[in-house]
Image: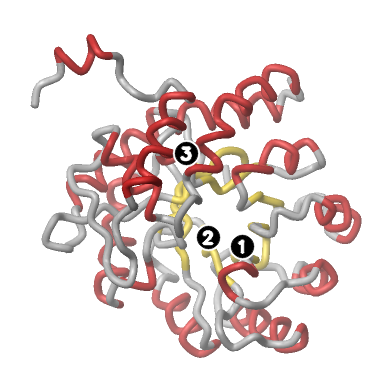
């Protein structure tokens, strides 16, 4: 179940800034009912870097309890410190999560040799399955296919989230990796083409607001029904783009609030609310994806 349409879930917050656990339950139930196959908790979209260690632990414990075995939970566990990443991963050993999403160490800019040792050390200190996460636009380092192939020899490293947007890598990776190794796109804009070239699914930001549509898109890709998949993707394409008009998760949190999925559009500094011009861009994309309620529906909705 760690393939197809996986949602990188936002962390809802109250106006006070505290984590909104009631909203988290509503979001998870919505995702499950919409056909999402797994959830990433405390990834980039989940604002893990602005939560305290105690909050991160509580969010994961709560998410696993709320999922109640209905959907796998993948937890973000990466750190720029190898020792911290090992400690955090070990803390989650008996938490009930299905896998870890382990981002490349940011800011340090390690060499390929350093990346190899970093992930090897984490893998050697846990039995939890590890999904590598390569997002050089945020971390300042790039996990090369040849390094990934060496890491794939370790039994606990089972997959990769590739957020480079570089589609030429898919064929290279498929040629270097075992068939069982999971390849997931981390870029909604190119996710359909990623799957067309041999990828197994997407860890999606768009799915926060279009969970059912993303589930359908991934199922069409699995069934190799490329024409209807392309038509659906064209409808979602403005949304894929608009949700990154400012730093993720700023736009997607605003969109979730606009759709009534969360009560408060609260972020923690240094993230700030979506600017007014960007709000209109996201609004237009939601409309293009047929996600906004009609005027008649809005008139009958309780306020």
Within 10 angstroms of label 1, few (less than 14), some, or many (20 or more) residues?
A: many
3D distance between C-alphas at marks 1 and 2 = 7 Å
Tag 1 secondary structure: strand
Is 28 drawn above or below residue 303 in the view shown? below
Q: Which residue is mark 3?
A: 207
Judge by depth and name the residue closer to the eye, 9 or 277: 277
Q: Which residue is mark 2?
A: 99
Determine if residue 159 is in view: no
Within 10 angstroms of label 2, few (less than 14), some, or many (20 or more) residues?
A: many
Judge by depth and name the residue closer to the eye, 70 or 79: 79
Label 1 or label 3, whichever lies nearer to me, is: 3
The answer to whether mark 1 and mark 2 are in CB contact below 8 A is: yes
Q: Which residue is mark 1?
A: 131
Colour logic: secondary structure
Is 256 drawn above or below residue 227 in the view shown? below
Residue 125, percent from left and from top: 57, 82
Residue 210, percent from left and from top: 45, 32
Label 3 or label 2, whichever lies nearer to me, is: 3
Residue at point 75%, 38% (across, down): 193
Left or right: 238 in relation to 270: right
Residue at point 88%, 57% (across, down): 172
């Amino acid at each position: 179940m760690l393939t197809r349409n996986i949602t990188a879930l936002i962390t809802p917050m109250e106006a006070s800034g505290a984590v909104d656990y009631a909203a988290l339950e509503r979001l998870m139930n919505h995702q499950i009912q919409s056909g999402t196959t797994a959830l990433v908790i405390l990834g980039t979209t989940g604002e893990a870097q602005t939560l305290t260690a105690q909050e991160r632990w509580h969010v994961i414990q709560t998410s696993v309890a709320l999922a109640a075995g209905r959907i796998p939970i993948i937890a973000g566990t990466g750190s720029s410190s190898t020792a911290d990443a090992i400690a955090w991963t070990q803390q989650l050993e008996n938490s009930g999560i299905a896998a870890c999403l382990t981002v490349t160490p940011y800011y340090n800019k390690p060499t390929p040799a350093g990346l190899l040792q970093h992930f090897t050390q984490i893998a050697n200190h846990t039995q939890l399955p590890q999904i590598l996460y390569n997002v050089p636009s945020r971390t300042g380092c790039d996990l090369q296919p040849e390094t990934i192939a060496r890491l794939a020899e370790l039994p606990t490293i089972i997959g990769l989230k590739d957020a480079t947007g570089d589609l030429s890598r898919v064929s290279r990776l498929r040629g270097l990796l075992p068939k069982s190794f999971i390849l997931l796109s981390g870029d909604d804009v190119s996710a359909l083409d990623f799957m067309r070239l041999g990828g197994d699914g997407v860890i999606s930001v768009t799915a926060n607001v279009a969970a059912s549509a993303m589930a359908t898109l991934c199922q069409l890709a699995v069934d190799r029904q490329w024409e209807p998949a392309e038509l659906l993707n064209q409808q979602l394409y403005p949304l894929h783009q608009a949700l990154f008009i400012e730093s993720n998760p700023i736009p997607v949190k605003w969109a979730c609030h606009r759709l009534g999925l969360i009560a408060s559009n609260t972020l923690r500094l240094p993230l700030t609310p979506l600017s007014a011009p960007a709000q209109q861009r996201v609004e237009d994309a939601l409309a293009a994806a047929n996600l906004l309620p009609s005027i008649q529906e809005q008139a009958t909705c309780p306020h």
